[in-house]
Amino acid sequence: MASVVTDPSGTFLALQLASGTYRFHAIWLRDNAGDPQTRAPGNGQRLIALRDISPQTAISAAEIVGHMLRVTFAPEDKTVDYDLDWLEANAYDRAMAREPGWTGPGIETWDADLTDNLPVGRFDAVQSDLSARRDWLAKLARYGFAKLEAGPVEDRALFKVVDLFGHVRETNYGRHFEVRTKVNPTNLAFTGLGLQAHTDNPYRDPVPTVQVLYCLESSAAGGENMVVDGFRAAERLGEENPEWFDMLVSYCARFEYAGEEGVVLRSRRPMIELAPDGELIAMRFNNRSFAAVTDVPFDKMETYYAAYRRLGEIIDDPAMEVSFRLEPGESFVVDNTRVLHARKAYSGTGKRWLQGCYADKDGLLSTLAWLESRRPEAAQ
Ligand code: FE2
């Protein structure tokens, strides 16, 4: 049985549920009221600003009514009901101390062991069946990449992949870009060389958060695609040497691309980015566009480079990599804020033609959350 006790000050209450006791502040409860004067019934948007709530707001009465907590606030003399499940799901009265570099719920870091369990979906099913789409997007969110098989072999089919979850991010490379051997390449990605695993375009701010690579032709030997979990690499660096981890978190790197007429893209961001509470939120790693670092103090620069070198060694470690070959009609999607990708060298005979484009994680996570919010029986 749920019960509630209000502190004599009226500034907070303690709600006892089967799973534990949770304290909630008067100001928090009042701001999160769901009544139609506070939140628009249609879209759920808040209709008031904090300035509309008295700083003297206090709880004058609280009781359990059925499966609701009923709270009356002074000085407004306003009574609001809260669903107990909602309160439990949004409780903030819990231990929050975590080591820097923790990852959020739903994130699973991985290494080469994932090779035998590739996150993959079939194009037709993911396109036509919403529960299959939900499952594929859930894998993409959990592991930071996912493959899609048996798609159409046609020019710009990659846009049909983006349509599954979001919108294309157009850049100076166009709405999409071609990845194949070129004479006089303006960017090393268009040659037959192998590339070190990297995140794309760290010189942009904001960076494109999703990349799609779609295979249309693949008769050249080699050229396998390879991905590395940047979050796992950061975790390994932190376990091996916390000081080096701290270097790459605390100081900004610089990235630059000015390889074509009319374009000078620059950014100043850390290689390993943490939220203020230590959550690991992004990786940037790209040897080709790494610019002169000028934001590390003189007496720290050698340590910074030692940390950068070690992170690169971890990323190059075959124990970290998952490799797969893309056949025509196959594609993969990466979370470009987390998972590094690379291509192994391929021979000059035969052809290899991929098309790539950028998109963003907001659309991906929005589509996933919407699909997950639907009742299972309605997900078809
Ligand atoms: Fe790339």
Image: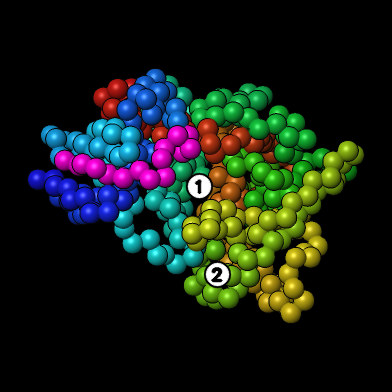
Q: Residues within 10 Å of mark 1 (few under 14, many from 20)?
A: many
Pointer 1 or 2: first along the chain: 1
Q: Which label sits on residue 277?
A: none
Residue 129 x/y as whole percent: 39, 24
**Quadrant the C terminus occupies:** top left
Q: Which residue type does callout 2 highlight?
A: Leu
SS of the residue under disc 1: loop
Residue 201 can be seen, yes or no = no
- In percent of width and height, residue 183 lies at 86, 41
Does the magenta-highlighted stretch encompass residue 353?
Answer: no
- Residue closer to the observer: 370 or 211: 370
Q: Which residues are the magenta region?
A: 49-63
Residue appearing at x 64%, y 36% in the figure: 358
Q: Nearer the viewer, residue 200 or 67?
A: 67
Name the residue located 44 percent from the left edge and 27 percent from the top edge: 47
Query: What residue is shown with label 2?
Result: 237
Residues at discs 1 and 2 in contact (Cβ within 8 Å): no
Residue designated by label 1: 144
Q: Residue furthest left?
A: 1
Q: CA distance from mark 1 to mark 2?
A: 19 Å
